[in-house]
Amino acid sequence: MHRLLERCGNDVLGGALMVIVGLGAWLQGMTYSMGALAAPGPGLFPAVLGFLLMPIGLAMAVFGKRAPARNEAGPRPEWRGWFCIVASIVAFIVLGSHGGLVPASFAVAFIAALGDRDNTLVSALLLGVAMAVVAVVVFWWLLQLQFPLFQWG
Amino acid sequence: MIAQACLDLLQGFGVALQPHNLMWSFFGVLIGNLIGVLPGMGALSAISMLLPLTYTMHAVPAILMLAGIFYGSQYGGAIGAILLNLPCHPPHAVTCLDGYPLTRKGKGGTALGITMISSFFAASVGIVVMIFASPLLVKIAFKFGPPEIFSIMLLGLLAGGTMSRGSPLRGVAMTIFGLLLGGVGTDVNSGVMRFTFGSPDLADGVELVALALGFYGVTEFLRNVNRMHTVGGDTRLRMRDMRPSKAELKQAFWPMVRGTAVGTLFGAMPGTGPTITTFLAYALERRLSKHPERFGKGAIEGVASPEAASHAKTQVDFIPTMSLGIPGDAVMALILGALLIHGIQPGPQLITEHQDLFWGLIASFWIGNVLLVLLNVPMIGVWVKLLRVPYRFLFPSALFFIAVGVYSTNNSLFQVGEVVVFGLIGALLVALEFPVSPILLGYVLGPMVEENFRRSMLLARGNLAIFVDRPIACGFLVVCALLIAAQVFFAIRSWSGRRGSIRERVGLPEALAASDD
């Protein structure tokens, strides 16, 4: 699978992705009422867009570069950073609905900071605390954000 | 008519100088400048982060503040581009070409000084053009019915897609993707839920702020994490260094004027992004120069001209955005979204119905630019220090502001989730070399394009010939067709050329792709 992905260039992959998105939009658009040209229904516009996207994706895949330019190694995948960034916002959502603003603010900055290799546990903790303070003072107190500081359940 | 425009403008100054409005304008300019200087942050992230703040404000100060953030961040971005070779906002990529070599020669201060003079000059010219062109455009704009608006929007979308960086096919594909995203939610005509995947949270559509912060915040962080470290160098700058000599001023004067002309011309055209404008201004200067080999090694003209072009375009861009409702680029699309949120329908009526807003905005542009010069010259030392904020603190704090900012738009945690989803989609698309700006343009214009198409069809009882029968609409469609034909021609030529011998095509989009990023 990995080999296969590498053998296709970005053009082929991108083109294929666009064909899939277009096909999905077209099929889904067809399920809404199409209406007539004199009174277009809600399905007409999305279906036409999806239909247009398919040949564009196809053209990209066909006329694009077949093999990727292998003159330089692409940037290394940065799994730790990527995981922490996504996890930080997910934590904000989960803690926001089950813990309140303070733990959520602390978590988003703390987890994201851990994604950077230059940060130590202490500096990440400090940043998290700082952001929790900003959340309370600026957003909760000054801007009257509707978000309980702590909540359970 | 000109006398009337001057009177209106005077009234506009009255609006803009009201302490309340002036305060928000100043605040916007300051924050914009601050965020623009920070590495990895540009106008788009600045505006989308602060957009939720304006929801509770009155429309006039809200728009004044957003506009202030916009040109403030452009001033700020130039600092990072020239001193550190870091183009945070794509148009500044061209400024880097000559700005950074100047810094390495120890002339960074002069380059910044020239940048500020050019920006201020270009913005002033752009504002004057706006004053005189807007009433004229309004007269024409009243002739615009749904078919005309549909066809000019089509042209804008097509231009935005084909002229963005990367290949035209990718740009158009992204425009269509954006149009589809704009269609998510309840259809206003029939009440049918479209593309909601059964989730009631999507019934009101995709949130603009979540989309913009996903694509321009989270996507950028995903790309830069652990790749950007301590960005700041040990550049030291004082006010004295910024004053250019007489010879340098003379050298920069005509490039500045020509850059302004290029920017003004392109600002009035919908869909042409700022990057292409700055690139054209730079290319023009190099073509005209007697010593083209100096460019790229620290030619002061190479800084003056593109900076002037980008600032003139910024100002003039407000004309199509406000009077026709057609944004020139992604930033304008955001400002258009803000107008809509405040219940102001952009269009020819805007200038007559919301006089205080329109003329107040124009007056505030000028005041804002004066404020920027006042802010930047004495405080350059502070801005340079800001460049040294380490990325490891910057992006976690920014993520916090993004999360809370998106939550505060509708008190909805679901929309915070949208940010992650769009961030990941954006990262995938960027990895596949797709440009993301056309998505935002398509997203904002999508509902309007569909609405105007449906209205034209209702008017014409389903006869598509209405687009050819009306002269203005037909004209725009002819330009669209020419644009497509030109792209197909270039594509065929380059394709057959590549198969024969490996010959470099010096096409604009590809040159842009090389200069960008």
Image (cartoon, rainbow, N blue to C red):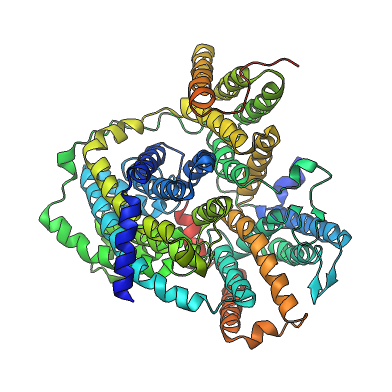
- The x and y percentages for residue B58 are 48, 46
Location of residue B83 (image quadrant): top left
Q: Is residue B104 visible?
A: no
In the image, taking residue B123 as reference, residue B61 lies left or right, namely right
Q: Position of residue A119 (x, y in %)?
A: 50, 19
Q: B226 or A43: nearer the eye? A: A43
Give the answer, above or below, for where B416 lies relative to B60: above
Lateral position of residue B459 relative to residue B152, left or right? right
Q: Nearer the viewer, residue A145 or A81?
A: A145
- Residue B99, above or below B134: above
Q: Is residue B400 visible?
A: yes
Point 21% across, 38% down: residue? B378
User: x, y percentage for residue B500?
Assistant: 60, 72
Q: Residue furthest left?
A: B246
Q: Quadrant of the N terminus of chain B?
A: bottom left
Residue nearer the viewer, B436 or A64: B436
Report the residue at 42% width, 27% height from top: B390
